[in-house]
Amino acid sequence: MTRQPVFRFAPSPNGLLHLGHALSALINFHAAKLLGGRFLLRIEDIDVTRSRPEFEEAIYEDLHWLGLDWETPVRRQSEHRTTYAAALETLKQTVRLYPAFLSRKEIRAAIEGQNTEQPWPNDPDGAPHYPPMDRLRSQDDIKTRLSAGEAFALRLDMQAALASCPSSLNWRELSDTGQEQFITASPADWGDVLLARKDFPASYHLSVVVDDAEQGVTHVVRGHDLYHATSVHRLLQTVLGYEPPVYHHHRLVLDGDGRKLSKSLASTSLDSLRRDGKTPDDIRKMVGFSEPDLRAFQQY
Ligand code: GLU
């Protein structure tokens, strides 16, 4: 028997939902319906400084207004610290994680101080790779810092992790027309990725992978801006022994200048559009949501 498909929409409550989120939520909700599957909403609130209860409330209000419903209780990542801490422990037994102490300013200074001809590599999001300083610290140095109570994040020693994985990692991507493609993952593009923040025992990459596995998500459907992150997710799934979902990275809703929408741009928030008298149907039209957006799933 094949498994019942499970879809999820996973917003972060650090701002109001905009048209791009509406498209993502609509595709997930209707794809789940089309396939007789389940639709989950997950609140990704590990960023304790930027997440706010009023944004979480607004997510529920906007999505209900759009005509969506989902299973309850809703999973809130902030309530699953121990699950992520356990995943970190498992990772520590197989791959090398190291405490990362540098602040943003120190990262910049370390990179500027590098004596190399080559330009410093950036990750696919445009952030510089984490400099090797913390990876190269002696055990004594690390111990001294930890016992002094210095705050630290945890990062993955990427080269060591790759050496312990199969030489080629890939993922199944459903194209817009419903073709299944095998995409080669290239986690090395991210350098030593963050796996736990200084203030929470998980990062975006770790929490998303753990939650998708724990919630039995079979179809990860999200915007194309997260396409490259899937490389890291496949690496973590492999090391943690999780069954990988199938992926579909959908088109993004762009502003008039062809840029990706941002939460800081209030004019495209669902909340302000609703206040301006727009209807859920207007929103579907504005994002161009229609039958072709579901073609990816027709055979799955
Ligand atoms: N929480 C992420 C965001 O709001 C989405 C995570 C995902 O779909 O993998 O961008």
Image (tube, rainbow, N blue to C red):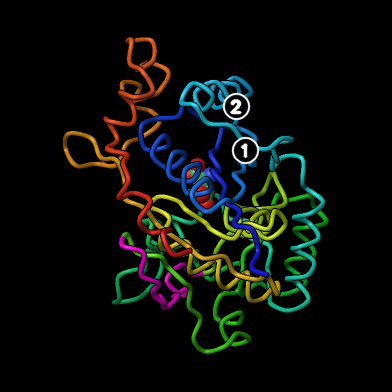
**Left of 90 or right of it: where is 126?**
left
Q: Quadrant of the N terminus?
A: bottom right
Q: In the rendered structure, which segment of residues is drawn in magenta?
A: 177-191
Asked if the residue at label 2 sits under 8 Å from ligand 1, the reply is no
Tag 2–tag 1 contact (CB < 8 Å):
yes
Callout 1 amino acid: Ile
Who's the residue at 32% across and 46% down the image? 291
Residue 192 position in % (x across, y down): 54, 68
Residue 79 position in % (x across, y down): 77, 40
**Is residue 131 inside the magenta stretch?**
no
Q: Quadrant of residue 83?
A: bottom right
Picture disc at residue 116:
none
The residue where tag 2 is placed is 56
Who's the residue at 17% across and 34% down the image? 256
* Residue at the limit of the structure toward the left, as seen here: 257
Is 27 located above or below residue 214 in the figure? above
The residue where tag 1 is placed is 43
Label 1 neighbour load within 10 Å: few <14, some 14-19, many 20+: some
Judge by depth and name the residue closer to the eye, 187 or 149. Answer: 187
Who's the residue at 56% across and 68% down the image? 133
Label 2 neighbour load within 10 Å: few <14, some 14-19, many 20+: many
Callout 2 amino acid: Glu
Judge by depth and name the residue closer to the eye, 225 or 187. Answer: 225
Residue 180 position in % (x across, y down): 40, 72
Q: Which element is circle 2 on?
A: helix
- Lower position in the chain sequence, tag 2 or tag 1: 1
Judge by depth and name the residue closer to the eye, 155 or 224. Answer: 224
